[in-house]
Image: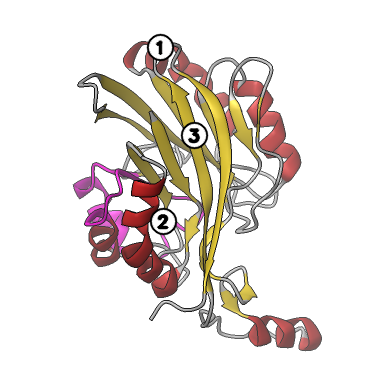
Amino acid sequence: MNILILGDVYGRPGRTILKKELPQIISEYQIDFTIVNGENASGGNGLTSKNAKELLNLPIDVITMGNHVWQQKELLETIDNFSQIIRPLNYPEPCPGKGYAVFSCELNNQTTKKICVVNLSGQIFMPSLNCPFNAMLPIMEELKESADLILIDFHAEATSEKIAFGYFMDGYATAVYGTHTHVQTADERILQGGTAYITDIGMTGPLDGVIGVDKQIIIDSMLTKRPNRFVTATGAVQINGIVLEIDEIENKVSKITRLYKTYETTT
């Protein structure tokens, strides 16, 4: 089976290019299950209920989030209405939403795989949440018993923290993939224990901006040291992510492939 995981969808350009190109990508790579990170899908800041529905009307099975999960405050009230949205597990409880869930994926050979998707937020240069390493420990046995595959979106800034978490989960998780920086890394590999790993899968949205924002706004801020209102960049767009090829007997990743596609415009 093949699993598609796409990096942070940024604003209208990201949503628009997915509407246009996602069906073709799914066909091209013979995808059985699709996950996207949606924490920047509404104007680059969080996710509205309207935009969540828009994404879930596409062939998307799960939306993971990150440090901007509550930027659109309505999601505090509505997240529990969306069984497909996963927020970082390591928010202190009580907290709306859930940090992991198990989904059923029916394959063409009429077998069903149980896929657990976990979302965690890092601690270094990030909002202060509970330790993501310790957050996993109490649920590891439960997840192993309830799922065939365990996929972890580790939403973090520091590459060192992401790499350490990958090794921490090696031999346990099916895959650990990083999100948040919007810059795709070239270190995809399968670790010694069999866990597929990449430090960051990149972003889906504006190509000619600074991680999604109009580049001149960011340059001006760097020059003047004064804050500016962020505006989503326009023009060329990209779709970044990974494709995981799964050995259906061993329930392990046999191949991890980076996906990097660019398009002239979303219109």
Q: CA distance from mark 2 to mark 1?
A: 31 Å
Say which element carries label 1: loop
Q: Quarter-wise, where is residue 170 in the image?
A: top right
Q: Magenta segment: does it hold 61?
A: yes
Quick check: 188 above or below 249? below
The type of residue carrying mark 3 is: Leu
- Binning the other alpha carbons within 10 Å of mark 2 as few (below 14), some (14 to 19) or many (20 upward) gives many
Q: Residue at x 62, y 76 (%)?
A: 209
Q: Magenta segment: does it hold 218?
A: no
Kindly identify which residue carries mark 3: 244
Quick check: 81 above or below 224? above
The type of residue carrying mark 2 is: Gly
Kindly identify which residue carries mark 2: 38
Quick check: 77 above or below 178? below
- Binning the other alpha carbons within 10 Å of mark 1 as few (below 14), some (14 to 19) or many (20 upward) gives few
2 and 3 marks in contact (CB < 8 Å): no
Kindly identify which residue carries mark 1: 249
Q: Where does residue 98 sit, x and y in percent of width and height?
A: 34, 38
- Binning the other alpha carbons within 10 Å of mark 3 as few (below 14), some (14 to 19) or many (20 upward) gives many
In the rendered image, which quarter contains the C terminus?
bottom left
The type of residue carrying mark 1 is: Ile
Q: Which residues are magenta?
A: 56-85
Q: How many marks?
A: 3
Q: Is 52 displayed left or right of 158 in the figure? A: left
Q: Where does residue 112 sit, x and y in percent of width and height?
A: 25, 21
Q: CA distance from mark 1 to mark 3?
A: 15 Å
Residue 249 visible, this orientation: yes
N-terminal label among 2 and 1:
2
